[in-house]
Image: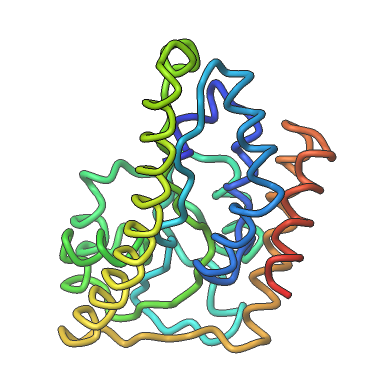
Amino acid sequence: TTAPQVGFIPELAIFDIPMLYPNLDVSRKALSGAFRAKLEEWYDRAGLKLLLFEPIYYRETTTSRPINTVADFSGLKIRTMENEYHMAFWKALGANPTPLSFAELYVALQQGTVDAQENPYEIMWSSKFYEVQKYLVNTHHIAFILSININKGIYESMPDEYKAIITESMKEAAEYLFDLAKSKNDAMLASLKEVGMTVMDPDPALQAELKKAAAETVKLIRKNVGDAVVDEVLKSAEEAAK
């Protein structure tokens, strides 16, 4: 995913902006449009050829209590990664972000050390968080994006026919991967419902509060990567959502 690549492509921090895309279809539209050229430019500067850049799932939220309004986040101890952008978002909602290793998370939820966590459906299922969490809130707050790239020098040394094969293969892979991700997400959500999780979809008022809280993360990212980069991704997201 893009997360470990931020160290050598700092602009990728923009994908830590919460509530950037409302769904996978919008995120894909935004990333495959004119903004794709900008992505390729960033990878090129890092000595890489970008081959595939595909949204595959979202971080959602599970909790020990229902979340109907923004007030329900107040004091909620939610496990997060040690990520200043993610933590700023939860703090803005009134929650208490608590960095914790993933290996400790199940027991922490079981014992009440933390009240909530954020992960894609697949991880909720495979880690059996449904055994220790009652509520699943479809916050769709951060998209996971799969990136496949290759050393630029190696790519450029290839014969043109090899490059063409790679390009076509990546196009086919992107279509397959996107369809697979959507069907798998649907299946995982259905499975989580079947084992008794109560699934909650934020109403427009709560969605507005989530977007408002994301502004704190946007401020931090602007400081680190600059206004121009942030404005570009926000513009592409807005246009894709029309």
Tell me the residue at 61%/38% (across/down).
Answer: 13
Q: Is residue 119 visible?
A: no
| Left or right: residue 95 compared with residue 100 | right
Image quadrant holding the N terminus, namely: top left
Residue 54 in view, yes or no: yes
In-image side of 231 versus 240 (left or right): right
Q: Quadrant of residue 176?
A: bottom left
Please name whichever residue, 193 or 131, is drawn nearer the observer in this view of the structure: 193
Point 53% across, 71% down: residue? 23
* Side of 146 where 17 appears, left or right: right
Q: Position of residue 229 (x, y in %)?
A: 77, 39
- Please state which of residues 216 and 150 is positioned toward the viewer in this rendering: 150
Q: Position of residue 28 (x, y in %)?
A: 54, 60
Vertical placement of residue 154 versus 179, above or below = above
Using the rendered view, name the quadrant where residue 224 is placed: top right
Disc tally is 0
Q: Position of residue 30 (x, y in %)?
A: 64, 58
- The relative height of residue 101 versus residue 88 in the rendered view (above or below) is above
Residue 240 location (% of width, % of height)? 69, 66
Which residue appears at 63% of the width and 37% of the height?
A: 39
